[in-house]
Amino acid sequence: MKHSLHLTELGLSKEEVLIYQTLLEYGHLPARILSSKTGIKRVLTYKVLDQLEVAGLIRKEDESTKVAQFYPEHPEK
């Protein structure tokens, strides 16, 4: 993917790029589904999601009674 190279050049790891692009494609997903769609182990998926959230590229919405959903943010934010 053309955008993968740009994101990697900006310092994102291949796992960060893959998870971010998957969220851009699907809109929002829980970590379990992200792990399944990307082939990244769930433990690493959570670590990468934390890193992307700190970088401002995703946001996490979790209600106490529901599974957390992760949403992509616009990259220019």
Image (cartoon, helix red, strand yellow):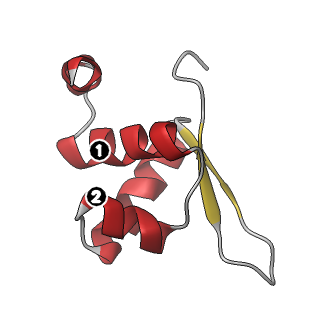
Going by the numbered disc 2, the residue's amino acid type is Thr
Numbered circle sitting on residue 18: 1
Give whichever of discs 1 and 2 has the lower sequence position: 1
Q: Does residue 27 sit above or below 10 in this rendering?
A: below
Q: Which residue does the numbered mark 2 point to in the structure image?
A: 38
Q: Residues within 10 Å of mark 1 (few under 14, many from 20)?
A: many
Number of callouts: 2
Whether tag 1 and tag 2 are in contact, CB under 8 A, the answer is yes
Q: CA distance from mark 1 to mark 2?
A: 7 Å
Q: Is residue 45 left or right of residue 74?
A: left
In the rendered image, residue 39, in percent from the top left (x then y), is placed at: 22, 64
Numbered circle sitting on residue 71: none
Residue drawn at x 25%, y 28% is: 11
Q: Does residue 67 sit above or below 12 in this rendering?
A: below
In the rendered image, residue 70, in percent from the top left (x then y), is placed at: 59, 55
Going by the numbered disc 1, the residue's amino acid type is Leu
Q: Does residue 74 sit above or below 34 in this rendering?
A: above
In the rendered image, residue 40, in percent from the top left (x then y), is placed at: 24, 65
Residue drawn at x 52%, y 46% is: 26
Residue drawn at x 59%, y 51% is: 28
